[in-house]
Amino acid sequence: MQDASAKVLEHSEIGAGYRFLVFEAPEMAKSLSPGQFVHVKVPSLEASALRRPFSVFDAADGKVSILYKTVGRGTAALNSVKVGDVLRVLGPLGHGFPTVCDGSAMLVGGGYGVAPLHFLARALKSSGQADVKIFIGGRTKADLLAVDRFRSLGVDVFLATNDGSEGVKGLVTDPLDDELARLRETGGRFELFACGPDPMLKAVALRATGTASRGWISMDRHMICGVGACYACIQKTVRGNSRCCVEGPVFRAEDLVWE
Ligand SMILES: Cc1cc2nc3c(=O)[nH]c(=O)nc-3n(C[C@H](O)[C@H](O)[C@H](O)COP(=O)(O)OP(=O)(O)OC[C@H]3O[C@@H](n4cnc5c(N)ncnc54)[C@H](O)[C@@H]3O)c2cc1C
Ligand code: FES
């Protein structure tokens, strides 16, 4: 783990409330793996010394990128960061996704939850995994992020929106269930990988629990220290309380206990 000074190389709006930020961190970029996160100290919040956790969208060629949604004070302050500014970034943090898969890789993301799935999709594709599908859901088409990035990796993309403005009208589990049914009919094996809002994660986890297929779920819990010291980020599991920042954020689906 390093606490790096990272120069901002790119920072752009990619849709209502969503931004894409790239920073230079050569050592970190080499050691990050998909599903891990970085803890970013937002410059104008320096006094509080609190950092904000973000999944890694990609890490390559000495650069690390994140995709974030503005939801409160920290992310609003992050909006004002400019190209050339230097951020303090702690990482790599947490346990990520496995990057080998038994059968088809079925990725399921909602909102900014697509971020770690992009890094994962690229890793799976470069390790020779042929069949990678992503199911992206959102309230409306403005919440369907990075669709072209996934397509350019050669990933099959399935879209769903609550209002029908893009893709299937309904939940992301609708096209997922169609594909799972197709795979089951032909005896195809698969693993599920998910990141997004809790109801979506629970729905995906239940589709893997108690079956022969493995599920990997990235949990988003409010964090303070990000390194295991404060116990702010507890996730209930079958083995008791786990810290999302150390034992997670990615957990085996069958280990999670849902409220
Ligand atoms: C492992 C991990 C990976 C993450 N990856 C990303 C990412 O790739 N992109 C991205 O946009 N965000 C991501 N987040 C969430 C991000 O860290 C929070 O949105 C951010 O910390 C909010 O900071 P803020 O100061 O803007 O909001 P605050 O002012 O702290 O909070 C604003 C509102 O958001 C709620 N909130 C804060 N943190 C969380 C959280 N973690 N989960 C749910 N609600 C929260 C608060 O309760 C409050 O209602 C991730 C979180 C974790 C734990
Ligand atoms: S954020 Fe402090 S223990 Fe996880």
Image (cartoon, helix red, strand yellow):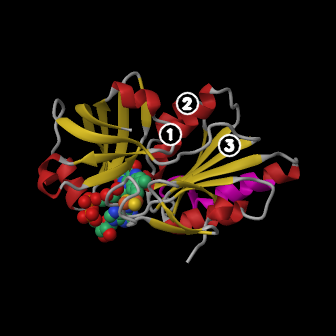
- Give the position of the C terminus as an image quadrant: bottom right
Cβ–Cβ below 8 Å for labels 2 and 1? yes
- Please give the residue where the numbered disc 2 appears in the rendered image: 153
Answer yes or no: disc 3 within 8 Å of ligand 1. Answer: no
- Decide: few, some or many residues near mark 2? Use Cα within 10 Å; few <14, some 14-19, many ≥20: some
Which residue is depicted at the point 32% across and 29% down?
Answer: 25
The kind of residue on which mark 1 rests is His
Residue shown at the point (73%, 42%) measured from the top left: 104
In the visual, does 62 lie left or right of 252?
left
**Mark pair 2, 3: CA separation:** 14 Å
Q: Quadrant of residue 146?
A: top left
Residue 211 point in image, percent of width and height:
79, 60
Q: Residue at x 23, y 56 (%)?
A: 50
Question: Residue 118 shows which numbered tag?
Answer: 1
Q: Is residue 111 above or below residue 13?
A: below
Give the residue number, with chain letter if any, for mark 3: 105
Disc 2/disc 1 C-alpha distance (Å)? 9 Å
Residues under numbered marks 2 and 3 in contact, where contact means CB atoms less than 8 Å apart = no
Q: Which residues are magenta?
A: 165-181
Closer to the N terminus: mark 2 or mark 1?
A: 1
Amino acid type, label 2: Leu
